[in-house]
Image (tube, rainbow, N blue to C red):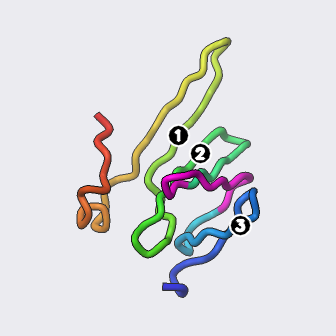
Amino acid sequence: MSKDTQIVETVSGTWLRFPNNFKKFQCLVELPDQLSLNINTKSGCVHVHKKDCDDVFQYVGELYITANGNQLQCTVQAAPANEEVMKTPGKQSDAS
């Protein structure tokens, strides 16, 4: 497992395991419920990752937060389904 993964430090100083292709933005935050947010402060994009059964944080989607006057707009895009998600259908969430 460790050959295909890397450990990355969050803003709070904890270390999380990600796939080797993970690229850290300016701000990596760990949240409850086995989630992490990888925040790109330049583009406003936030990549969401969820810990899998091997304790590796896998990409599950992204969101964009923008301000239009006094209103906030949020656009969410889920990652395409992959074989790992298909093996554990209870882990999927319905975005409808």
Amino acid on which the number 1 mark rests in the picture: Leu
Q: Relative to residue 87, is residue 48 drawn left or right? A: right
Asked if the magenta segment contains residue 28, the reply would be yes
Residue sitting at 61 percent across and 15 percent down? Answer: 71
* Mark 1 to mark 2 CA distance (whole Å): 5 Å
Labels 3, 2: front one = 3
> Quick check: marks 1 and 3 in contact, CB under 8 Å?
no
Q: Amino acid at mark 3?
A: Glu
> What amino acid type should be assigned to the residue bearing mark 2?
Val
Across and down, in percent, residue 52 comes to: 42, 67
Dot 1 corresponds to which residue? 63
* 61 over 85 or under it: above or below: above
Residue neighbourhood size for the residue with mark 3, other residues' Cα within 10 Å, grouped as few (<14), some (14–19), many (≥20): some
Whether 84 is drawn above or below 90: the answer is below
Upstream in sequence: badge 1 or badge 3: 3
Find residue 55 and report its horizontal and vertical position in percent. 48, 72
- Which one is in front in this view, the residue at disc 1 or the one at disc 3? 3
Question: Badge 2 is on which residue?
Answer: 46
Q: Which structural element holds mark 1?
A: strand
Q: Position of residue 75 (x, y in %)?
A: 49, 32
User: First in sequence: mark 1 or mark 2?
Assistant: 2
The residue singled out by tag 3 in the image is 9
Mark 3 vs mark 2, CA separation in Å: 17 Å
Q: Is residue 32 above or below residue 70?
A: below
The answer to the question of whether label 1 and label 2 lie on touching residues, with beta carbons closer than 8 A, is: yes
Residue at x-position 24% and y-position 62%: 86
Q: Which residues are magenta?
A: 24-35
- Seen at 52% across and 40% down, the residue is 63
User: Picture quarter containing residue 8?
Assistant: bottom right
Pointer 3 and pointer 2: residues touching (CB < 8 Å)? no
